[in-house]
Image (cartoon, rainbow, N blue to C red):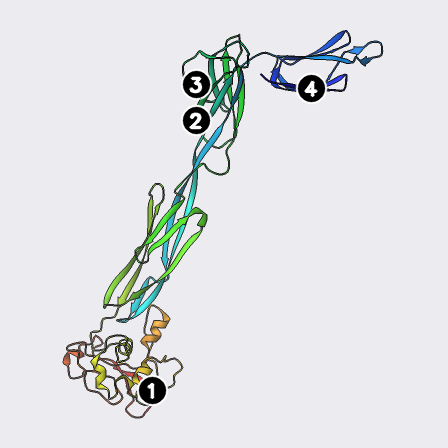
Amino acid sequence: MGSVTFTSDGTWVDWTSTVGIDAVIVKGGPNANVYRYDPPAESFGDTGLVTPTNPNNYKPYGLSHVDFCYDIELQVSKTADTSWTRSHTWTIDKVGDETELELAAGEMHDVAYDVTLDATPTDSDWAVQGEIAVTNPHDTMAATVTGVTDSMTGGIAADVDCGGDFPRSIAPGATLVCTYGPTALPDATDRVKTAVVTATEAVPGGTATADVTFSEDPTSVVDECIDVTDSLEGDLGTVCVEDLPKTISYTHQITAEECGEWTVHNVASFETNDTGATGEDDHDVAVTVECQTGCTLTQGYWKTHSEKGPAPYDETWAMLPNGADTTFFLSGKSWHEVFNTPPAGNSYLLAGPPVRRGRAERAQRRRHHGGLRRDGCGEDLPGDLHAGAGLRREEDPGCRGHRSGGRPRLLQQRSDRPGPLRRVT
């Protein structure tokens, strides 16, 4: 049923109890002091209780015995288990370091892309649930429970299920267990729950309280991770909230495979792991590849299509005495070596006027030194080989339909004296 513990120095008494005490009687000499607690409420402990005063010496009588008065009433206890949910809303941002490119036919360029991911948490679904245990402490008498209610700070009530209709009988020493909730709450504010058990007078009812508090860690997490994919790069992996902030970077090579204007459309997207929510963002690169309406192919083509590879051999190289190893005019280097030599700082090679490009390094390529000319108008046949000039086809009138209005441009050696190359039209 419970226990009481007290200590005394012979006149003074301190005590604690596991059951509610209505009054304590401290006896000494012919009289006793009565300490009443209920009403207003039972007590579970007190200090400084003393025996009556001896009128002969004005000192307390010696302690003879202590009586504890209490009601045999139902013992009530309760629990309060809280829960809440944290959901995540994700965003994705896709950017690239290029939006427009001007490339020569066959030219390649790397575009750097960044995919940035972030998430915003939202807390919701605060709730509390638990048990109310009602125990009959009487040794011989059954208790009759007429009702169990549960309420909370702020006037929030909970439905209680005791497994049947009232009244309910509890045998001596037995326990009735009721449940409540989950009860929805508007927020995570700390509250107090109070259970009240009513019963007949034979074994009166009782009350119990429990604190309603929420931990910092949610009991349920929604959409804490996403799978990220990219239309160009493929699977970019799984990203979770503990990885944030997160930026995924990669490089994609754009190749000018055909002339004209076209767009490289790139979409990065995600799907959440719980609800399947999706999102995406894109980045476009507008590509312009100059169409060769005359007869010119770039040096990038020729230096890769010689007998040295790696691209398939173009038989136009056979028009030179020693193919790609033929000495390039007065340079002291072969045609193949010259085509692989940067023009910057080379006194023999003279760059032409700047050409507007998407990036500076590609402009330098466009200003590079001489190249072989290949018939782009009819058959893939070489034209006359001129001293100090590239390979071209002059006799084909179709090659004169160049958009500049004249014959195809080429780089040739000055005819008046050996020296640097210059651009002629």
For the N terminus, the image quarter is top right
Are the residues at dot 3 and dot 1 in contact (C-beta closer than 8 Å)?
Answer: no
Callout 4: few (<14), some (14-19), or many (20+) C-alpha neighbours within 10 Å? few
In the image, which is nearer the foreground, mark 4 or mark 1?
Answer: 4
Reading the image, the residue beneath label 1 is: 333
Give the secondary structure at mark 1.
loop
Are the residues at dot 3 and dot 2 in contact (C-beta closer than 8 Å)?
Answer: no
Reading the image, the residue beneath label 2 is: 183
Q: Amino acid at mark 4?
A: Phe
Instruction: Return the mark for residue 162.
Output: 3
Q: Position of residue 91 (x, y in %)?
A: 38, 48
Instruction: Return the mark for residue 6.
Output: 4
In the image, which is nearer the foreground, mark 2 or mark 4?
Answer: 4
Q: Is residue 160 visible?
A: yes
In the image, which is nearer the foreground, mark 4 or mark 3?
Answer: 4
Looking at the image, is 297 positioned above or below residue 208?
below
Residue drawn at (55%, 12%) of the image: 139
Of the numbered discs 1 and 2, the one sitting upstream in the chain is 2
Occupied quadrant, residue 366: bottom left
Give the secondary structure at mark 3.
loop
Of the numbered discs 2 and 4, the one sitting upstream in the chain is 4
Occupied quadrant, residue 73: top right
Q: Amino acid at mark 1?
A: Lys
Callout 3: few (<14), some (14-19), or many (20+) C-alpha neighbours within 10 Å? some
Looking at the image, is 190 positioned above or below residue 21?
below
Total numbered labels: 4
Q: CA distance from mark 2 to mark 4?
A: 41 Å
Q: Position of residue 157 (x, y in %)?
A: 45, 22
